[in-house]
Image (cartoon, rainbow, N blue to C red):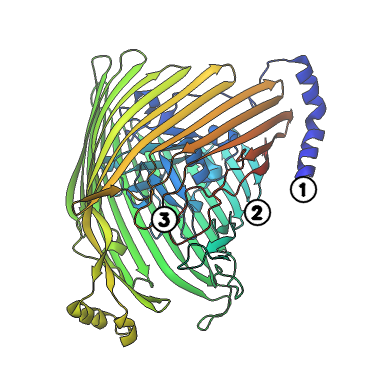
């Protein structure tokens, strides 16, 4: 199939391309022209659109062009290949995401400024993000609760989607195939006429489970091994359908409404009596999200915008092996989440050289979890304001504050202040911002009992939990021209009242309480109960770091970018400081891209790599070793027919076949989940009107 695809592309365009290449003309067609914008428009840092070099808060941007040129089809691949401060650890319970040393629950993920709901054990289901619609990904490091409210302690990742308006009708098909059963197929249909836009998309994504070593140590032994089929990477199949409508009757009013539906199911080895590591069921996830909104511009500098979003997510066990209590095909619900959010924001130009933002936000979260015996909900109401003012010619200051009233956490203020001095091509920035995280519904209301291999396990929520708070400061120096951008940022992020699960020893009094709470617990199980887990405010966090970012258009068609992140992350429990779980001290990403067009044929070559030092694990786990993974991707654009643009691609992931071949043991966790060197091929077809 792959050979046929490339043969047809070459057959339809080969003669035209050869003639143009032979002439060595430099007439780039509009379809094959590539530019590298070192000063894109961003919105996440300030809450309103402005050029990157003009925002007083540093923001990292990954464009759809960069994503495409690197041959990336997944959201986690886009972040980890270009953002060294981000790391991922995939599992059947979702991708464990870290930003600047802090985990999932401290990272706010937004789609066009609206929070993405739906997590599995605090791991957001990243397959709900429609990569075929991504225009750019903006990453804001550090606390940002003054604009975005709860959860924005480690930072904000905002996915900005694209709604093209150039063509009456546009159809795109984008296919990517690689080893280990990896396949992504995305189809989009865009219609735009007389101010009305319709944007339809469908994405199918799949991958097989795999291991890098088929052996594991027998429990209790450091020498005896046995075969295991438990996957290092959990395979899956997912579908995502999206529909969005826009309508702009004039240049003052713009309305939008959209709906997204997602379905995902894992694909793990079944239980096998002859080998360990199989499972009786697959994890099934479903999500439905719809939103309506609009913006009205009174003048060029004064506008009001409003939005309402409803987000529903559920997951559970889909049995594919018959057990004592379940048949093949049975579905057992584990967790169901509903979220409703409305936001009204005004952006005003009240002063010369100034921008004022005033807004209000209301949110309702509901959680039903059979595994934790939860059926609860909380509401949040917030008001916020921010003023950004330019002084003289090259000084800009921003002050902002948000008041959040949470059902259980109460009322809290989160301020922000920034100062930027911009002499010539330089920017010098100083930032202070406060972070705020209200306890999650599971942390508040969990009431869980189970028996694992004969041993009882108990976890309790805590309704008296205080919110987690942080203080973030950063200093940034940046040099910015059309050809070169160099940025250095130093920061410190301190978190108080971190919510953690603590083991509480069982005595006679607590045992009686536990037996009363869980009457299903037998006397034999109670005799084996040594401790139970309770959510508490006990820890402190301290993260310090330095980031260096360089991007250069060295000569026509060649762009080089390099990013480095040093992160020193610690946590304090009682009087003892320890390294933060899964933190990485040194990480770097490098990307070199060359593009050249000969008439109606264009070649794009991209080499990118991620290098990182060891990943720290706590307790009895040993640290995971560092690694370096390099990827090569080439894209060939043929603009030789009136009705279509053809872009076949071919590349190699993990050029030097780097894998972690350590034998599984109870003391080992991993940082590198790559299966090794793989050939990747793709074909993108853009049908033109």
The residue closer to the viewer here, 644 or 270, is 270
Q: Nearer the viewer, residue 629 or 100?
A: 629
Q: Count the numbered circles shown.
A: 3
Q: Mark 2 sits on what residue?
A: 181
Q: Is residue 468 above or below residue 487?
A: below
Helix, strand or loop at label 3? It is strand
Q: Residue visible at 47% across and 42% down?
A: 626
Q: Residue furthest bottom?
A: 523
Circle on res. 123:
3
Residue at 76% over, 20% down: 21
Q: Position of residue 320 (x, y in %)?
A: 58, 73
Q: Quadrant of residue 52?
A: top left
Q: Residues within 10 Å of mark 2 (few under 14, many from 20)?
A: some
Disc with the residue nearer the chain's start (1 vs 2): 1
Q: Nearer the viewer, residue 205 or 538?
A: 538
Q: Earlier in the sequence, mark 2 or mark 3?
A: 3
Q: Quadrant of residue 176?
A: top right
Q: Find the residue positioned furthest to the top.
A: 424
Give the CA separation, mark 1 to mark 2: 14 Å
Q: Position of residue 595 (x, y in %)?
A: 62, 24
Q: Which mark is residue 459?
A: none
- Mark before the other along the chain sequence, 1 or 3: 1
Check disc 2 and report its element: helix, strand or loop.
loop
**48 left or right of 22?**
left
Residue located beneath label 1 in the image: 1
């Amino acid at each position: 199939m792959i050979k046929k695809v490339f043969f047809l592309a070459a057959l339809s365009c080969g003669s035209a391309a050869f003639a143009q290449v032979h002439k060595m003309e430099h007439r780039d067609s509009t379809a094959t022209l590539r530019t590298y914008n070192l000063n894109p428009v961003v919105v996440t840092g300030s809450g309103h659109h402005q050029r990157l070099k003009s925002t007083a808060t540093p923001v990292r941007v990954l464009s759809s062009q960069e994503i495409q040129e690197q041959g990336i089809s997944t959201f986690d691949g886009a972040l980890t290949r270009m953002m060294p401060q981000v790391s991922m650890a995939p599992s059947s319970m979702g991708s464990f995401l870290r930003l600047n040393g802090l985990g999932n629950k401290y990272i706010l993920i937004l789609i066009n400024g609206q929070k993405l709901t739906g997590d599995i054990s605090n791991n957001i289901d990243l397959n709900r993000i429609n990569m075929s619609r991504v225009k750019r990904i903006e990453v804001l490091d550090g606390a940002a609760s003054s604009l975005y409210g709860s959860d924005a302690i480690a930072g904000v990742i905002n996915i900005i989607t694209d709604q093209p308006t150039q063509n009456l009708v546009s159809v795109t098909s984008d296919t990517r195939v690689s080893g280990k059963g990896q396949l992504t197929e995305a189809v989009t249909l865009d219609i735009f006429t007389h101010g009305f836009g319709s944007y339809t998309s469908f994405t199918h994504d799949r991958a097989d489970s795999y291991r890098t070593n088929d052996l594991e140590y027998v429990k209790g032994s450091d020498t005896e091994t046995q075969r295991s089929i438990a996957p290092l990477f959990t395979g899956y199949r997912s579908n995502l359908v999206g529909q969005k409508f826009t309508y702009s009757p004039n240049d003052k009013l713009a309305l939008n409404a959209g709906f997204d539906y997602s379905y995902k199911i894992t694909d793990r080895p079944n239980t096998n009596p002859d080998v360990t590591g199989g499972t009786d069921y697959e994890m099934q996830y479903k999500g439905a999200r719809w939103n309506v909104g609009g913006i009205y511009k009174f003048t060029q500098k004064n506008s009001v915008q409003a939005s309402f979003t409803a987000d529903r997510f559920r997951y559970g066990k889909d049995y594919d092996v018959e057990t004592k209590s379940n048949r093949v095909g049975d579905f057992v619900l584990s967790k169901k989440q509903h979220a409703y959010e409305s936001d009204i924001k005004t952006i005003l130009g009240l002063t010369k050289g100034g921008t004022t933002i005033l807004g209000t936000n209301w949110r309702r979260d509901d959680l039903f979890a059979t595994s934790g015996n939860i059926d609860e909900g909380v509401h949040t109401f917030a008001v916020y304001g921010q003023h950004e003012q330019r002084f003289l010619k090259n000084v800009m200051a921003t002050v902002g504050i948000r008041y959040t009233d949470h059902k259980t956490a109460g009322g809290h203020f989160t301020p922000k202040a920034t100062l930027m001095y911009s002499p010539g091509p330089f920017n010098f920035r100083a930032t202070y911002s406060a972070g705020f995280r209200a306890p999650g519904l599971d942390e508040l209301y969990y009431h869980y009992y189970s028996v694992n291999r004969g041993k009882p396990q108990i976890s309790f929520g805590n309704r008296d939990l205080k919110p987690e708070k942080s203080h973030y400061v950063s200093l940034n120096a940046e040099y910015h021209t059309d050809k070169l951008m160099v940025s250095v940022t130093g920061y410190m992020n301190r978190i108080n009242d971190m919510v953690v699960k603590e083991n509480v020893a069982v005595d006679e009094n607590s045992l009686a309480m536990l037996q009363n709470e869980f009457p299903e617990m037998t006397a034999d199980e109670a005799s084996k109960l040594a401790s139970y887990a309770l959510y508490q405010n006990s820890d402190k966090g301290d993260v310090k770091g330095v980031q260096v970012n360089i991007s250069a258009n060295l000569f026509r068609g060649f762009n080089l970018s390099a990013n480095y992140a040093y992160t020193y992350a610690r946590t304090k429990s009682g009087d003892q400081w320890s390294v933060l779980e899964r933190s990485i001290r040194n990480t770097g990403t490098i990307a070199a891209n060359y593009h050249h067009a000969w008439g109606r044929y264009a070649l794009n070559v991209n080499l990118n790599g991620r290098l990182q030092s060891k990943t720290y694990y706590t307790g009895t786990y040993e640290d995971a070793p560092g690694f370096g993974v390099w990827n090569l991707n080439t894209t060939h654009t043929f603009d030789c027919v009136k009705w279509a643009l053809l872009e076949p691609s071919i590349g190699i992931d993990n050029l030097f076949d780097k894998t972690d071949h350590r034998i599984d043991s109870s003391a080992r966790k991993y940082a590198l989940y790559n299966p090794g060197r793989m050939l990747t091929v793709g074909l993108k077809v853009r049908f033109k009107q």
